[in-house]
Image (cartoon, grey):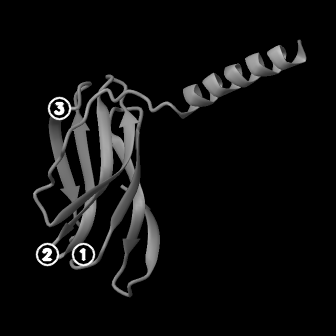
Amino acid sequence: MNKMILTILIVLLSGLSLTLKAQPDNRWVHFYDGHELSDYLSDVFTAADDEYALAGYTLTDSGSGFWLVKTDEDGGELWQHTYLDEQYPGINNWCYTVIQNDDGGFLLGGRCRDENDQGVFTVL
């Protein structure tokens, strides 16, 4: 009797283990191009309109800048914009996070460098 209970318990735990390791289904897969040397996305935010805001950074010949991509609910690109530091060209800036503010715009957060190559956290 104890062997039967132990066997059932092992089978149940094995099934639970396989369920926990299962990969989630992808809603969609898309590739986005910032038209620069290299592009990196680091955050995604579901906007109030059930569309998505993707944030990251893009490398250019003159440094790197914050990169924001807005998509529809199926991942189709609606628009994108790169924010480069005009005061300190050639300085690397990396965007790591995005949230939506109350008026529907987006706040981008990341690391920027100044003319002395000192790092600061920035919200744009």
- Point 31% across, 39% down: residue: 53
Give the residue at the far bottom of this rendering: 116
Residue 118 spot, x, y in % from top left: 43, 82
Q: Is residue 9 left or right of residue 66?
A: right
Q: CA distance from mark 3 to mark 1?
A: 33 Å
Regarding residue 90, the answer to whether it shows in the image is yes
Amino acid residing under circle 1 = Gln
Task: Name the residue carrying label 3.
Answer: 76
Task: Name the residue carrying label 1.
Answer: 87
Q: Is residue 97 left or right of residue 7?
A: left
Give SS at disc 1.
Answer: loop
Q: Is residue 79 above or below residue 61?
A: above
Amino acid residing under circle 3 = Gly
Residue 11 spot, x, y in % from top left: 68, 21
Q: Is residue 16 left or right of residue 51?
A: right
- Point 18% across, 46% down: residue: 32
Residue 115 spot, x, y in % from top left: 33, 84
Q: Residues within 10 Å of mark 3 (few under 14, many from 20)?
A: some
For the residues labelled 2 and 3, say whether their Cβ atoms are less than 8 Å apart. Answer: no
Instruction: Judge depth for marks 3 and 1 and give the one in front.
Output: 3
Q: CA distance from mark 2 to mark 3?
A: 27 Å
- Point 26% across, 24% down: residue: 73
User: What is the quadrant of residue 58 in the picture?
Assistant: bottom left
Disc number placed over residue 61 in the picture, else none? 2
